[in-house]
């Protein structure tokens, strides 16, 4: 078999031909078997730690930058049960699903006063993209308030 890095890239290329960009996992870790939790389900937190240990340090692993991304990163960590997230890692690849996305949308609404639709969370599934949407919503809200003479 080819080197592990080559196999990863070949798999990523194969997936990219068949899936929309947001569905292609940003990291691929080769495993003999999945880590399981005590109840026999796939342990997603252990999977993320294996990818980290596997040395797949890339741009996507860069830590959140700025106050919005940092706060959003803390929310992601809490929801996904992780110690840290990279600003360009995919919410879905880290274990996010529709239920967690709904909880994330609520946390964003409460914490930032911005409404993100579930489709937006999945379409731009990184901390950096979510932070940009939050900033955009804040700007839109401030502009609307200014135009209405509220500010």
Image (cartoon, rainbow, N blue to C red):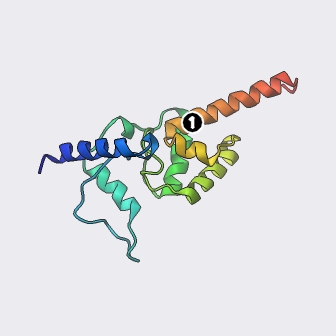
Residue 96 drawn above or below residue 122:
below
Q: Which residue is mark 1?
A: 131
Q: Is residue 85 left or right of residue 56?
A: right
Tell which of 46 and 34 is nearer to you.
34
- At label 1, counting other C-alpha atoms closer than 10 Å, the crowd grade (few under 14, some 14-19, many 20 or more) is many
Residue 125 percent across, percent down from the top left: 50, 43
Residue 20 percent across, percent down from the top left: 44, 43
Residue 64 percent across, percent down from the top left: 47, 37
Report the quarter where the C terminus lies.
Answer: top right
Residue 68 visible in this rendered orientation of the protein: no
Q: Quadrant of residue 48?
A: bottom left
Q: Quadrant of residue 136?
A: top right
Which residue does the image show at 53% across and 42% down from the upper left? Answer: 123
Residue 144 drawn above or below residue 46:
above
Which secondary structure lies at badge 1?
helix
Q: Is residue 141 left or right of residue 103?
A: right
Residue 61 percent across, percent down from the top left: 37, 40
Residue 100 visible in this rendered orientation of the protein: yes
Which residue does the image show at 43% across and 52% down from the upper left? Answer: 94
Q: Is residue 94 left or right of residue 2?
A: right
Residue 148 drawn above or below residue 98:
above
Tell which of 35 and 75 is nearer to you.
35
Residue at the far left: name it: 1
Residue at the far bottom: name it: 39
Which residue does the image show at 12% across and 47% down from the upper left? Answer: 2
């Amino acid at each position: 078999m080819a080197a592990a890095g080559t196999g990863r890239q070949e798999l990523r290329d194969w997936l990219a031909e068949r899936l929309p960009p947001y569905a292609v996992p940003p990291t691929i870790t080769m495993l003999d078997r999945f880590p399981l939790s005590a109840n026999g389900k796939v342990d997603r937190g252990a999977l993320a730690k294996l990818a980290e240990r596997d040395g797949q340090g890339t741009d996507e692993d860069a830590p959140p930058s700025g106050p919005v991304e940092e706060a959003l990163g803390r929310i992601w960590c809490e929801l996904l049960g992780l110690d840290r997230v990279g600003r360009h890692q995919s919410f879905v690849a880290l274990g996010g699903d529709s239920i967690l996305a709904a909880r994330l949308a609520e946390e964003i609404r409460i914490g930032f006063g911005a409404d993100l639709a579930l489709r937006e969370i999945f379409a731009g599934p990184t901390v950096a993209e979510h932070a940009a949407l939050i900033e955009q919503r804040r700007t839109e809200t401030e502009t609307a308030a200014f135009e209405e003479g509220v500010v």
